[in-house]
Image (cartoon, helix red, strand yellow):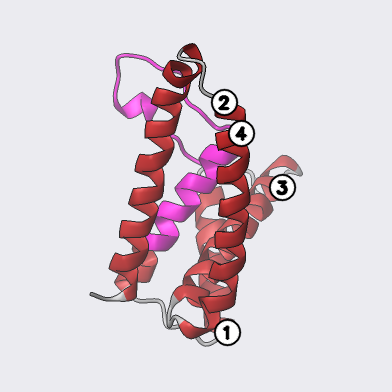
Amino acid sequence: MNNAYTLLITLGTVAFVAVVLVAFLPLLRRKGIDTKGIIDKAAATLEKLGAAASLIKPFVPGLAMFDGILTACGTAVNMAEQLWLTGQIKDKEKRKGAATDYVKRTLKLIGVEVTPEIDKLIDATIEAEVLKLGHHPKITGDADAQQPTI
């Protein structure tokens, strides 16, 4: 099993645990269980796991590159948004192109070849970063109208 699959399995497990906690915490509170203590212990454990993950990052090939792509995409979306807000990019649709171009130039600068897989990762990560900005479309019956764009 390669590192990407291991990372995906880990992230999926963490997401599953988070959903279970959100679903069962109110039930536990009603039964008189000290959920605040449980949450505090979980938060402390997660901090330790985060520190451990940053220690092993140099030894896991590709993880540092993945982290770099995520960081570059966040910076690129913020850059494109700022260019649009200041009028340097007139067309809203050109923001995604500017963000994608920035990430690809950054990766080229650090010696990473942009493969079709990395290109898909860039595209998905840019879309996720846009949602963080709060660009949510109005919900209508039209599925195409629900697709956010930057």
Q: Which mark is residue 31?
A: none
- Magenta stretch bounds: 121-150
Separation (CA) of disc 4 from disc 1: 44 Å
Q: Residue at x 61, y 33 (%)?
A: 37
Residues tagged 4 and 2 counted as in contact (Cβ below 8 A): yes
Mark 3 / mark 2, whichever is N-terminal: 2
**Magenta stretch holds residue 41:** no
Rendered image quadrant of residue 49? bottom right
The x, y position of residue 20, in whole percent, is 37, 32
Q: Which mark is residue 34?
A: 2
Q: Nearer the viewer, mark 4 or mark 1?
A: 4
Separation (CA) of disc 3 from disc 1: 24 Å
The x, y position of residue 70, in whole percent, is 53, 61
Residue furthest out toward the right? 86
**Residue that numbered label 1 is attached to:** 110
Three-letter code for the amino acid on which mark 1 is drawn: Ile
| Circle 4 residues within 10 Å: few <14, some 14–19, many ≥20 | few
Separation (CA) of disc 3 from disc 2: 45 Å
Residue 92 appears in the picture as rendered: no
